[in-house]
Image: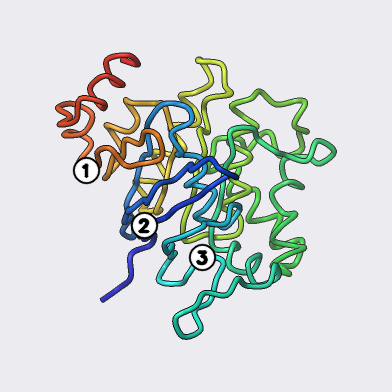
Amino acid sequence: MTAPMVQAKGVIKNFGALEVLKGIDLTVERGQVCCLLGPSGSGKSTFLRCINHLERIDAGTLTVDGDLVGYRRHGQKLHELRESEIALRRRDIGMVFQRFNLFPHMSAVQNIIEAPVNVAGIPRARAAQEALRLLEQVGLADRADHYPAQLSGGQQQRVAIARALAMKPKLMLFDEPTSALDPELVGDVLDVMRTLAAEGMTMVVVTHEIGFAREVADTAVFMDEGVVVEAGDPRQVLVEPEQERTRAFLSAVL
């Protein structure tokens, strides 16, 4: 049996006395798109950051492609990996943040080739060729030499997606990728994500874009106060939710 791409069992995360995640159970199969929805402060982004060990979990287990995230098991105990080992495993996980986090002193192409050249050791010429292909994929072939300040927010976010794809990840994480954009720029970014989903990329997406989740997701997960309130087929969860808390949220945002 092939392991799920993401599997969380009883994941707990605390910040001091504040329990942010209260025992999250979630499975994302290969090629699936999972959309995490819920009010601010519900734990969605924290859980996403736990998937690539940007946040350490306090209890439970979390695996990506069958491997523990950030830890190795020795007998009955878990031991945290060295930072170099964690970084090596993160290469398989692309992440796109709410803010684009592009290097302002680098052009679009330079931003994209930075990790392939300096982390993966890919020759610069080959990395640049791949960067141009990725820019074409996200509709920015004519912006290769532009710097972030010369690009709109939506264009910067599409460069950020291309940058994440340059490491050829097996899993893509999106943390509210459109929430910092002007409304008229959202569509271009969502179109790129739709294409990735159609191509079979496994994706976990924190989003407030209910229409996108209903259209693209294989699984919709509604979180509130650190727990999964409801999860399943988007047509069920987002159209005819079973839980009153889910209904109240959707009535407020739709």
Mark 3 Cα shell of 10 Å, populated few (<14), some (14-19), many (≥20): many
Mark 1 Cα shell of 10 Å, populated few (<14), some (14-19), many (≥20): some
Query: For mark 2, what is the residue?
Result: 10
Spatial CA distance of label 2 from label 3 is 14 Å
Give x and y (percent) for residue 64.
Answer: 44, 64
Q: Nearer the viewer, mark 2 or mark 1?
A: 2
Q: How many marks?
A: 3
The quadrant holding residue 36 is top left
In the image, what residue occupies the spot 40% across and 42% down?
Answer: 195
Sequence-wise, which precedes: disc 2 or disc 1?
2
Query: For mark 1, what is the residue?
Result: 232
141 in relation to 153, above or below: below
* SS at circle 1: strand
Q: Of the residues shown, which amino acid type is indicated by label 3?
A: Val
Q: Nearer the viewer, mark 2 or mark 3?
A: 2
In this rendering, would 121 be left or right of 81? right
Give x and y (percent) for residue 179.
Answer: 53, 25
Query: For mark 3, what is the residue?
Result: 69
Looking at the rendered image, the quarter that the C terminus falls into is top left
Residue contact at pointers 2 and 3, CB within 8 angstroms:
no
In the image, what residue occupies the spot 36% across and 57% down?
Answer: 10
Spatial CA distance of label 3 from label 1 is 24 Å
Looking at the rendered image, the quarter that the N terminus falls into is bottom left
In this rendering, would 248 be left or right of 150? left
Q: Of the residues shown, which amino acid type is indicated by label 1?
A: Gly
Residue at far front of view: 17
Sequence-wise, which precedes: disc 2 or disc 3?
2
Q: Of the residues shown, which amino acid type is indicated by label 2?
A: Gly
* SS at circle 3: loop
Residue at far right of view: 105
The quadrant holding residue 244 is top left
* SS at circle 2: strand
